[in-house]
Amino acid sequence: MGDYDYKYNQEAKCPYCNYEDTDSWELSDDGEWTECGSCGKRFGYERHLEVTYSTYKQDCANGLAEHQWEQMHGAPREYFADRERCSGCYDERKKEVVNG
């Protein structure tokens, strides 16, 4: 087997005995080395990540719909007591005071 058999696999595969570690997600993010759970030999590994994006419209941010303001919560409470966030576009504002 060539080295290519050990690159970009779904699980870490021991390059000595071909054992696939189904718990590869538990390996350290540092990606230095691990010991094979089958043959016991030490081997190095790298973790590869794939980044994807999802997009969505924010009609209220573009003046195509009304904002849906909701009370914000958090700490310090004094800061968030008069703050609102739009659930459609995540814009924030100080709550408008209505004098009655």
Image (cartoon, rainbow, N blue to C red):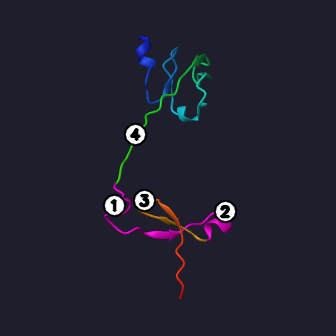
Q: Residue at x 58, y 17 (%)?
A: 43
Q: Mark 4 or 3 closer to N-term?
A: 4
| Label 3, residues with CA under 10 Å away: few <14, some 14-19, many ≥20 | some
| Label 4, residues with CA under 10 Å away: few <14, some 14-19, many ≥20 | few
- Secondary structure beneath label 4: loop
Tell me: 29 left or right of 76.
left
**Residues drawn in magenta:** 57-81
Q: Mark 4 or 2 closer to N-term?
A: 4
In front of the other: label 4 or label 2?
2
| Label 1, residues with CA under 10 Å away: few <14, some 14-19, many ≥20 | few
Locate the N terminus by quadrant.
top left
Which residue was labeled with disc 1?
A: 59
Q: Residue at x 58, y 22 (%)?
A: 36
**Cα–Cα gap, marks 4 and 2:** 32 Å
- Secondary structure beneath label 1: helix
**Nearest to the observer: residue 59 or residue 53:** 59
Q: Amino acid at mark 1?
A: Asp
